[in-house]
Amino acid sequence: MHVLIGYKHNKYFISNNNEKQVYNKLIFAITSGNLLTYNTDKNYTEPLIIDDISFTNNPRYIAIFNLFLNKNPCKFEKKIILAIEWLGQAYKDSSMQNSFLKAAISLEILFTHSEKEIITPSIIHQISESIALILGKDYEDCIKIEKDIKYLYGKRSSIVHSGSSKIKYYELNNLLNYSGKIIFEFLINYEYSNVKEIEELYSILKRKKYDKIIQ
């Protein structure tokens, strides 16, 4: 549901089996050497009716639920399911750094062959070029998207390798949006919806790349 909403905010609380959210927050304050605590119980959440027509008539809603109801998903569908789960965690996580890394993992699941694959500069180039080919409307758009993804992966590297916390909200939001758009392209776009293996995806993208060059 977080992926369907596509909006990172604590306004929505999504649970299974009528799980209740803990609203109280404990606040600590230090004044003149004294440590004070007090509770806040503001409820900023609002109910979300998942059988509302705005969801059930949405092709994204239908595609996701059909995918999760599939008892025998192919290898690539399993990747999409896992990517959705990681992206959902990214939307839900209150830490911007953790959220950013989880959104990146969501993309890496879709575009890498193995879970043991190390994210090298060549892999980043492959991911950014693939996303550009899938989402780009023309040459200029492809160049912009590829540049965006490489920039965002530079931020990912700074978190992983130096523990950087310098992530801006718009950067996180961009990565979340890219991951969500790619997932729904794979689910809804007829060009990719029948892909069974990642090798098939890269064959489609290679043909698309050279078609653009010829054109």
Image (cartoon, rainbow, N blue to C red):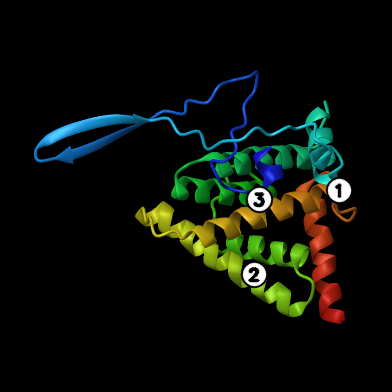
Depth check: 147 or 20 in front?
Answer: 20
Q: Position of residue 54 (x, y in %)?
A: 81, 42
> Residue visible at 65% across and 74% down?
144
Q: Amino acid at mark 1?
A: Ser
Element type at mark 3: loop
Q: CA distance from mark 1 to mark 3?
A: 18 Å
> Residue visible at 68% across and 44% down?
5
Q: Are marks 1 and 3 in contact (CB under 8 Å)?
A: no
Asked where in the image residue 26 lies, by quadrant, the reply is top left
Q: Position of residue 81 (x, y in %)?
A: 72, 37
Residue with the mark numbered 3: 112
Depth check: 109 or 53 in front?
Answer: 53
Q: Would residue 117 appear left or right of 71 to someone viewing this image? A: left
> Residue visible at 73% across and 54% down?
182
On residue 146, the disc is 2
Residue with the mark numbered 1: 193
Q: Amino acid at mark 2?
A: Glu
Q: Would residue 207 appear left or right of 198 to someone viewing this image? A: right
Q: CA distance from mark 3 to mark 2?
A: 17 Å
Q: Would residue 85 appear left or right of 25 to someone viewing this image? A: right
- Crowd rating for badge 1 (residues with CA inside 10 Å; few <14, some 14–19, many 20+): some
Element type at mark 1: loop
Quadrant where the N terminus is found in the figure: top right
N-terminal-most mark, 2 or 1: 2
Determine if residue 120 is in view.
Answer: no
